[in-house]
Image: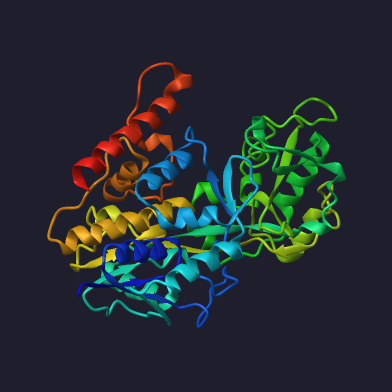
Amino acid sequence: MRRVTVVGGGLAGCETALQLSARGIEVELIEMRPEKNTPAHRSPNLAELVCSNSLKSENIQTASGLLKAELGLLGCFLLKMADGARVPAGHALAVDRDLFGSIVSSAIDGDPRITLARREQTDLALPGCAVIATGPLTSEALSASIREHLGDEHLYFYDAISISLATESIDTGRMFRASRYGKGNADYWNIPLTRQQYTGLLEFLKSSAKAEKHGFEDGMCFDACLPVDVLAGRGDDTLRFGPLKPRGLDDPLTGREPYAVIQLRQENASGSMTGMVGFQTRMTYASQKQMLKLIPGLENAEIVRFGSIHRNTFIDSPRLLDEGQMSLRRKGLFFAGQITGVEGYVESIAHGLIAARNIVDFMDGGTYRIFPPETILGGLQRHLSGGASPFQPMNANFGILPPVGGERALRKNRKAERSLDALKIFLDRRD
C-alpha cells in the first residue's frame, strides 16, 4: 500500500492530501494546531485564511482568474469548497473564513484514506515519501530542522495581515457602494478621501508607532503584501497608485473620482465582519485605533482583528529543490505551497495540486509532468525551478507567460485562450 506523510494542514497541504487520496494513496496529514498555535491563526480549522478573505478575481482576463480556470480543468478540491463558502465581492472570489475552514476540515475528516494527526512535527525524521507544506508560519523547531537539512540558503521575509472591523460599528452614510469600473456587483463600500484627508492619513502612517519585529528592517517583504505604513514612506502618491487608488470608482455625490479611496470588503457570510482592503500594517494596536479616527465613517469603528506582521518562511527552491520541488539532498522529501516560493492563496492551492501530481510521478518511477509554459501553472513551476538570484516569491501574473502579438487590448484574452487550449491538449496527452 502506498502511503505519504503531509506536514501542514493549510491550503497546500489539504489540497495535496485530497489529491493523493483521490489517486488511491493513503495519507497521514499532520497539523500542529490547536496543540500549538501561531501568531496569525484564530481557529483550529484546517486551511484557515489569515491575511484576507479574498481569493482574488475570477475574471479570466486576470492572472488569478485564469489560474482558477486552469485549476477547474484539473479537478481542484479547495476551489470547489471555496465556492461553497462564498460571500459577495464583485468579480472576486471571497469567502467566509470560518465556513471555508469548516468545509475543508469536514472533507479531510470524512476522507477514509486520510488520517489527521494533531501534533507538532519538529524534524524531518519522516518515513518514506513525505511533503512539507507548513507555509509561511513554519514552527521554529521545524524551520531549524529544514535549515539544517538544506543549509544556510534557507530564507525568510515578513508578511502582513489587514485590519478587520465590526460591520455594525461602521458609519456607511459617508461611503458609497461600487466595484471598480462597475465590474460585477457593487459589493464594496468605498470611502472617498479629499486631498486634505489623504495627506493627514499619510502623515499619520509615516509617524505612527510601529510594532517592530526583530530583523524586520533587515528582512525581505513581498511587495504585494507590504504594510500600508511602509508604502506611505515610499512617496506621497504611492498609496494613491496602490491600495487607495481611486481609478474606476466615481463618487455618486460628485460624479468624479475622489482624490483617494479606501475600500471595505465583507469578510464573512453573515456580514458581521468587514476588512479594510490593502491595510496590512505593522503599526501598534493603539496606532491602528488612532488611525481610524482620521477616516470618514470609521471614527467609531471597532477593530475585531488587528493588523500585524509575521515571519514568512520560504526556500531558495531553484538551488535547493529539483523541478518537482523534491529535496536534492533526500529522495522522496517534497515541499509544497508557500514555503517553496509561490505567493498567494490560490497559488498555494495550485502548488498543492502540483505537488500531488509530482509525488505520484516520483512513486511511479516516471518523470515530472511540467505544465505547458503558456499556462499560469507552468509559469509558476518554471519560476520555482529556474528563478532569478536572489530568489523571490512569485504570484500569478501574466508576466510569467510567453508574450503574444496583436493589439495590446486583446493580449490578455489571447493569453487566456492560449493557456486553456494548451492545458487541454496537455491533459489529453498525459492523463
Name the image colouring: rainbow
Is residue 276 in sight in this rendering? yes
Instruction: Name the residue rendered at 40%, 35% in the picture.
Output: 399
Q: Position of residue 256 (x, y in %)?
A: 78, 25
Q: Position of residue 280 (x, y in %)?
A: 63, 54
Residue furthest to the top = 407
Taking depth in this image into account, of 98 and 119 the one nearest to the observer is: 98
Where on the picture, by quarter, is residue 15? bottom left
Taking depth in this image into account, of 95 and 110 the one nearest to the observer is: 110
Name the quadrant of the N terminus: bottom left
| In the depicted structure, whether residue 265 falls above or below residue 78 | above
Where on the picture, by quarter, is residue 161? bottom right
| In the depicted structure, whether residue 68 falls above or below residue 274 | above
In the displayed structure, does residue 218 sit left or right of residue 199?
left
Instruction: Name the residue rendered at 31%, 50% in the picture.
Output: 384
Instruction: Name the residue rendered at 81%, 30% in the picture.
Output: 252
In the displayed structure, does residue 141 sit left or right of residue 355?
right
